[in-house]
Amino acid sequence: MENGEDVISSSAPELAPALQKKRKCTTIKFVVAAMAIGLLLYLCLSDSGDEGRCNLFHGQWIPNRSGPSYNNASCKFIDDSDNCLRNGRPDSHYLYWRWKPYHCDLPPFDPVVFMNRMRHKSWAAIGDSILRNQMQSLICLVSEVEEPIEIYHDKSYKARTFYFPNHNFTIATKWAPFLVKAVFNENEDGKDNSTIQLFLDILEASWTNDYHKYDYILIAGGQWFLKTTVAWENNSVIGCHNCGTKNLKELGVYEPYRKALQHVFDYITSSDHKPFVVFRTWSPDHFEYGEWYNGGICNRSEPYREGQFNGSPNDHNMKKIEVEEYDKAKVVASKRGIQLELLDIFHLSLLRPDGHPGPYRRFDPFHGNKSAKVQNDCLHWCVPGPVDTWNDLMMKILSKSGALNLLTSYEKPLQGLELLYFQ
Ligand SMILES: *[C@@H]1O[C@H](CO)[C@@H](O)[C@H](O)[C@H]1NC(C)=O
Ligand SMILES: *[C@@H]1O[C@H](CO)[C@@H](O)[C@H](O)[C@H]1NC(C)=O
Ligand SMILES: *[C@@H]1O[C@H](CO)[C@@H](O)[C@H](O)[C@H]1NC(C)=O
Ligand SMILES: *[C@@H]1O[C@H](CO)[C@@H](O)[C@H](O)[C@H]1NC(C)=O
Ligand SMILES: *[C@@H]1O[C@H](CO)[C@@H](O)[C@H](O)[C@H]1NC(C)=O
Ligand SMILES: *[C@@H]1O[C@H](CO)[C@@H](O)[C@H](O)[C@H]1NC(C)=O
Ligand SMILES: *[C@@H]1O[C@H](CO)[C@@H](O)[C@H](O)[C@H]1NC(C)=O
């Protein structure tokens, strides 16, 4: 007798393939088991064991001496109204905090990695001035690697496009404060001289016209729905918000916002163009001792601790509507192979009453008179400031979902220093 296999194959040839299959099966099972054990070990030993429990948006602000990676002198792309350092804000404590999710770490934004992955790519940021606020931070963060040139701006600098020639990378901000179409009737000095006409079922063309051109979309809105508006649907007026004497049905802000978001998400999830879409949640304000129009201020110089401040019911409702509509859209997006992610900055921003310009929305607001009455901005954010964390989170979201993966988005072979970084 030689070996068993020969015996079987000679005496019962019809059984041989079955047995071989069985052996193959055993081998495969062994390999699969080994891989599973390897994977388990890997999960236990590496950080990613926590990834399952990690909710990036649940955590706390902890003091950190490193501070921001740029300032008003190193970055020249900060709007005057958000440039708290330049405008003379005296305290700088607000710059030395780091967001720490409970079950994992949020690495700081890495401009070298980000810019390399963004070669030949483009971003559109669609929304209001708070989104522009975040984009200033993003541009400052990446301008350590390359400074952009501005290749477009509209008359009022609300829509701007920046281009990074060495990376063939574009960042455009699209002015669409309601995301849906709005007609303003502004007079010469930019003040509204009549009520805003809001078309809830028509998207703002400033972004839909160009949507197909972008690889990445960051989109957010909300605050403008608090304004006085007349709302239209199906070509007729359906009511208004806050319009007083006009004898129209008061719609409030929630239903108009929900309808607008539904149209936005419908567009995104049914589009043939499939960019990577990040939807950012409601950014809370921190006016105290009044509102923005009647002397409200934000003079705190430290973050709130968990539970110390909960925001207004309005904040929570707007955020809830966003998450509900996002969740619905996410299901459709997944089915269609569209990457749609949530950047939920609401809670972590709620804890940062110290991150707003306050009186320092203007240069030297007090002119030496500390008791002078000055309008405060407790809605936008200082740059640098807590908005930098929004971009840290955005980078983390991109890398978690593979969008910053070297193989998929880097098209040229690595060279020189890049080899050192990425091998
Ligand atoms: C401060 O932040 C930096 C960058 O995020 C981090 O590397 C460092 O460990 C932090 N230090 C402390 C004390 O948390
Ligand atoms: C930056 O801000 C500091 C004050 O914090 C000021 O002394 C300096 O002149 C500013 N530089 C620029 C370029 O704005
Ligand atoms: C720049 O990127 C665009 C895609 O966004 C591409 O079509 C174009 O060929 C690139 N230009 C160069 C010079 O690589
Ligand atoms: C608002 O201003 C625009 C531009 O100056 C003007 O054409 C329009 O008639 C004004 N509307 C009202 C209601 O005053
Ligand atoms: C507008 O039209 C759509 C369908 O065309 C309908 O579902 C919706 O109820 C209409 N809205 C109003 C306010 O009439
Ligand atoms: C903020 O301003 C209020 C009202 O003027 C004052 O009572 C309070 O002490 C100030 N808080 C801080 C931290 O300066
Ligand atoms: C400072 O501002 C207050 C409030 O506006 C005003 O009453 C006071 O006269 C000002 N003082 C000086 C020296 O200008």
Image: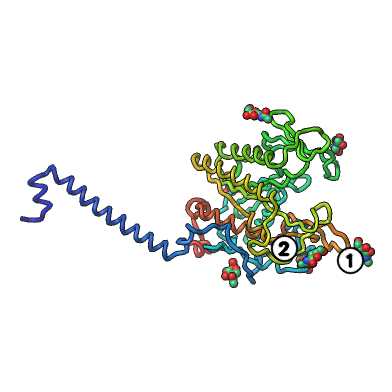
Q: Farthest residue toward the bottom?
A: 65
Residue 66: tell me if it is visible.
yes
Q: Which residue is mark 1?
A: 369
Residue visible at 13% across and 42% down in the picture: 14
In this orientation, which residue lies closer to the viewer: 372 or 278?
A: 372
Residue 354, numbered circle: 2
Is any atom of residue 147 visible in this view?
Answer: no
User: Where residue 316 sits in the image (x, y, percent)?
Assistant: 66, 50
In the image, residue 404 sits, relative to residue 89, either above or below, namely: above
- Image point (60%, 37%), residue name: 267
Residue 38 image point, x, y percent: 36, 61
Say above or below: 27 vs 213.
below
Near mark 1 (Cα within 10 A), the count class, few <14, some 14-19 or many ≥20, is few
Give the quarter of the figure containing the N terminus. Answer: bottom left
Indicate the amino acid at tag 2. Answer: Asp
Q: Earlier in the sequence, mark 1 or mark 2?
A: 2
Residue at x 47%, y 57% (from the top left corner) = 52
